[in-house]
Amino acid sequence: MRRTQIYLTEREQMAVKSIARRLGKTQSEVIRTAVDRFIDRESPLTRLDLLRSARGLWSDRRDLPDADALRREWDRLEPGADGS
């Protein structure tokens, strides 16, 4: 682990202190947890992995409408799609 110095606003510092007290953790632990969550959420690789893992999730479902048929219907209903 590496030591890092950061600047927090008074509001941020008070909130971190309050959360740490409530959770029984140090302020450093709370900040590291927040940074880890931010990294997980913002990491493009992680988001891509999540999308890939969801691929085919509903492939066995038979109660869902046919996406191609829906698209054809939407195209048919779109103003100007029939040349008018």
Image (cartoon, grey):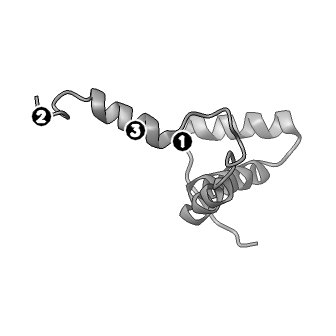
Mark 2 and mark 1: Cα distance apart in space: 59 Å
The disc placed on residue 9 is: 1
Of marks 2 and 1, which one's residue comes earlier in the chain? 1
Q: Say what amino acid the circle numbered 1 marks.
A: Thr
Q: Is residue 75 left or right of residue 47?
A: left
Question: Dot 1, crowdedness within 10 Å: few (<14), some or many (≥20)?
Answer: few
Mark 3 lies on residue: 71
Quadrant showing the C terminus: top left
Q: What amino acid is labelled 2 in the image? A: Gly
Label 3 residue SS:
helix
Percent coordinates x, y for residue 71 in the rendering: 40, 38
At x 67%, y 49%, the residue is 59
User: Which residue is labeled 2 in the image?
Assistant: 83
Relative vertical location of residue 3 with respect to residue 21 in this rendering, above or below:
below
Seen at 35% across and 32% down, the residue is: 74
Q: Where's residue 27, x and y in %?
A: 76, 48
